[in-house]
Image: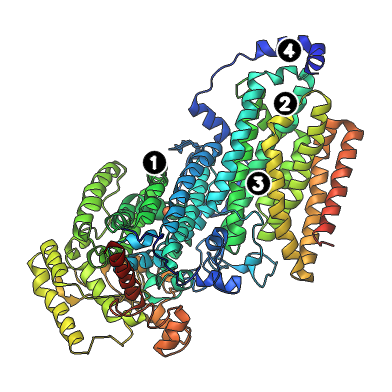
Amino acid sequence: MTIDIKTQVIQPKRQTFKHVADRLGGDRAASRYEEATFDLQPDVNFHYRPLWAPQFEQFDRRRTAIVMRDWYDLKDPRQYYYATYNIARARQQEAADSAMEMVERRRLLDVIPADWLETVRFCLLPLRHYEWGANLNNAAITAFGWGAALTAASCFAMGDRLGMAQLLGRIGLLLGGNTETALIAAKTRWVEDPAWQGLRRMVEDSFVTEDIFELFVAQNMAMDAMVLGLVHDHFGAECDRRGATAIPLLLGFAAEWREDNARWVDHVVRVAAAEGPENRALISRWAADWSARAADALAPVATHVLGTAGGARAMEDLGGRFAERMVRLGLA
Amino acid sequence: MRMMIILPFIGIIERETTMNVQKKISLKDRYRILTRGLDWETSYQPMGKVFPDVGFEGIKIRNWDDFNDPFRLTMDAYWRFQAEKERKLYAVLDSFSQNNGQTAITDGRYVNTLKLFLTGISPDEYMAHRGFAHVGRQIPNAGLRISAQMQALDELRHAQTQIHTIGQYNKHFSGLHSFRRMHDRVWYLSVPKSFFDDAVTAGPFEYMVAIGFSFEYVLTNLLFVPFMSGAAYNGDMATVTFGFSAQSDEARHMTLGLEAIKFILEQHEDNVPIVQHWIDKWFWRGYRVLTLVAMMMDFMLPRRIMSWKDAWDIYFNDAGGALFGDLARYGITLPKYVDVPAKEVNRLSTEAWSIFYQYTHAAAFHTWLPTDQEMDWLSASYGPDWDRLYRPRFLHWRQMEKEGHRYYNNALPQLCQVCQIPMAFTEPDDPTRVAFRDTVYRGERYHFCSDGCKNIFDHEPEKYVQAWLPVHQIFQGNCGGASLDQVLDWYGIEKGVDNMDYAGSPDERTWKEWEAMRGRVAG
Ligand SMILES: [Fe+2]
Ligand SMILES: [Fe+2]
């Protein structure tokens, strides 16, 4: 039988765990995010070297050239722990489902001109393989990164990218008249079409990038800025202009997710860069290199969708905004 | 407005509409298209460089596409199911904390099982999360990779929800406040820690067999059922709710483990002996970790669920027997040393609890001697040998307590190089002789508690010589100092609060205050 709180007051002996209190600067009520994240990753007294990478410890700060006094400074501004993460995504997915249902029910795809519909298939559907690559890269960050603050958030990002790949897959099913045809064609494009090879090459290069924070910057900041910027800002606007409003509607979840994810990415980059000039120089170089490569790789896709001049304008716009973002995040 | 847009394209609408024969795609196809269709064969970077960790273990895969996905979960469904479970779980946790649910347990001693769980098991849930992330990065097949990734997410869930659940007890009881620090340092916690470190540092296939199969499928019932039923029997509604909530995850994990091992075995006959050794190894390693569970069941639960012996019979002998019958067609046999647990089943928990009783000053939970009634239960469960061999020991210690000379063992014990349990287990065929095994490797002698642990060492000596053995580390001065006080500080154990007997502990005082309150409310 529990003690009735109406008649009795039970004073807790402590508010939270000691390692959490140490970080909060005293024993205070901690948030669920803090209790579920701080110091969760073991950091000492590992028993064995990994058979698959004996040059490293089981978890190893030397997986990146980035140095942090405390990797738990890289907190998730969204304060996601497993429950809040899944609840947030389930809600967004529900909205995405109703958008999709509405597009089907009102046959909104039918109003899109055939040639533009083909352009949509060309430029949107192969990106599910890009998302799949992003899933793999965030799995790598989760496996090899340091500290639960970074790696729990990257694990959620890993799930997100699978979700995004499958959202594009569902759009592909719609665009294929509920058959696999459009998706099969998209995969062939991803693997063979010259316009897509720059991006595919870059994604495959990212798979073998060893520095785990470089991988973070390459994938979650630089490549995403260019690829998702082209899709949601330029391509989305063009869809609106061409009466294909169903497409931005179907991509609503992805667009919203992109903002949510960027909040996390920006915060991590800003804090890591502010740690010291060496970090800042490294991150700046990675961001500049990978974004420039991404811009080159995407140019043929942009041209295909927006025409030569339009494509060039779009890439210029994305490059300019990326440069501004770098300044905003304290990168050189 | 919309009409104006639509009208110019009437012709197109008609064409598209006739194309749109709205076929229904089966769920199976839908899953195949949405998940399995994502992979491509890399060519700008060779597959071997993109997935470098799948080759070195010697496992041969003829065709990755043969892997059968047991759940066919897409991410949207995953979010939906898991969000629903989390909403319900956290609603219970909120009300548990508002209503001081921790006062409803059977007895203050019960919380010590939660201390064992939070310091020993929850950090391993976290390790399982990282291990599955590694598999989820390394396996070059979308189906298996996604299943592993979802398990990586689930295991993070388990770690985090356990922290939140038991966090309520941390506000009122000792020994829980530094569970992370303790897990990486305290001597007996190196048993579960080294277990998971061992798995995570193994290759992706061994990890799947070790955790996905041996642990999740063969042994998990022996870990979670006792803890969760123990919670139910002892009025801990928060932990029960967590346990129920995790059950559907566990069902998924067990199925994945079984599918994965069948897949590996079916791919090539050369895989069979490799997998057989992993099964032998991880059965024994898991069984040794379960020593802590045996002790919890037989000595720590104020209200017992069943004896360790009954649990072993039900969850290993019956369930495991059927399982290995199933695997026989691949040439897989029961694990090596599978007969040993039955031989030591009557004494395992007693030998373990005796260690903790003697080293109570160095433990992060409280100990006590069994009451007469509890000893009667033990002898009823374990037969006349228990009365003959162990009751006198406890009665002797009880007498010493009465005389003001409670027995403490101040010598640092020798630890098994593999399982890291103090060398206190007796010979399988002779409960009066302590078992010692050893191996000389590169001029050094290494000690083991059993043939099972020696066998593991002899297969991979270069791995197990690296073990971070808590007692060696104290001798080498790596644990805060040479005195007990210094070591306890370094462990994060608050002296006179977290350690020593339950009798006279702050926990006991807290519990008695609540009982008194209850008396006043009732009276
Ligand atoms: Fe788990
Ligand atoms: Fe051992």
* Residue displayed at 62% across by 34% down: A95
- B28 shown above or below B247: above
Q: Mark 3 or mark 2, which has the lower sequence index?
A: 3
Residue under label 1, please give it. B266
Q: Where is residue B246? Give x, y as percent.
A: 41, 49
Residue placed most toward the observer, B310 or A144: B310
Q: Chain of mark 4?
A: B
Mark 3, residues whose alpha carbon is within 10 Å: few (<14), some, or many (≥20)? many
Gap in angstroms between the C-alphas marked 1 and 4: 51 Å
Q: Secondary structure at mark 3?
A: helix
Q: Amino acid at mark 2?
A: Ala
Mark 2, residues whose alpha carbon is within 10 Å: few (<14), some, or many (≥20)? many
From the image, which quarter does the N terminus of chain A lie in?
bottom left
Q: Amino acid at mark 4?
A: Ile
Residue under label 3, please give it. A134
Q: Quadrant of ligand 1?
A: bottom left
Q: Is mark 2 within 8 Å of ligand 1?
A: no
